[in-house]
Amino acid sequence: MQQRSPAQTVPALRPLPRSSRSEAYLESLQILERLHRLLLDLVKDEFERLGRTDLTPIQAMLIYNLGTAEVTAGELRSRGMYQGSNVSYNLKKLVELGYVHHERCEMDRRSVRVRLTPDGQEVRDCVAALFTRHAEGLELSGVLDDPPIEGVNLQWRRVERFWAEQIRYIY
């Protein structure tokens, strides 16, 4: 008899009645917050396993989100979730540690553009390999199939757009 992973034994989720939608939305927010903390813990554990103790998980995620681009700190901040962290402080530390190169823009001297050094690219590759391993494991377990992860991502992009519009309308 074929073994099924615990994730596969969970029945498919059914749409909730309208009265429960608000509760489901609030639960989603709690899950999202927990997932973010768990993601940082996963990165921290991976770096400890590799013997890399010079970076915080937030710094590793900044490096990962910077990728191969050359961007300003503001652009980098808009790419990722850096709850409770100061992007400018962390970028300064990453420059000091040799993971990020920074350079003032010639057009606007107030603006600083950053990009990864070869050491920073190595860190990014470690994080990318971790995420690839997790994606493969989740795919094999069937967790990404019900509901399909593409549909989940579409829904989160809609929520993201709604939240962004709410922020714009405040001002």
Image: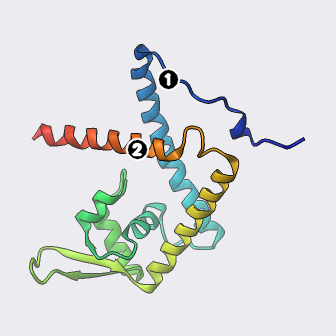
Q: Position of residue 60 (x, y in %)?
A: 46, 67
Left or right: 72 as drawn, with respect to 60? left
How many numbered circles does the render carry? 2
Q: In the rendering, which numbered label is found on residue 134?
A: none
* Residue closer to the observer: 143 or 76: 143
Q: Position of residue 112 (x, y in %)?
A: 20, 76
Identified by mark 1, the residue type is: Pro
User: Looking at the image, which residue is at 31% across and 66% down?
Assistant: 89
Q: In the rendering, which numbered label is found on residue 154?
A: 2
Secondary structure under tag 2 reads helix
User: Looking at the image, which residue is at 40% across and 44% down?
Assistant: 154
* Residue closer to the observer: 57 or 148: 148
Left or right: 160 as drawn, with respect to 32? left
Q: Which image quadrant for residue 44? A: bottom right
Quarter of the image where the N terminus is located: top right
In the rendered image, the vertical position of residue 64 relative to residue 2, given as above or below: below
Left or right: 137 as drawn, with respect to 61? right
Secondary structure under tag 1 reads loop
User: Looking at the image, which residue is at 41% across and 28% down?
Assistant: 25
Q: Is the residue marked by circle 2 packed among few (<14), some (14-19), or many (20+) residues within 10 Å? A: few
* Residue indicated by mark 1: 15
Q: What distance separates the C-alpha of mark 2 from that of mark 1?
A: 16 Å
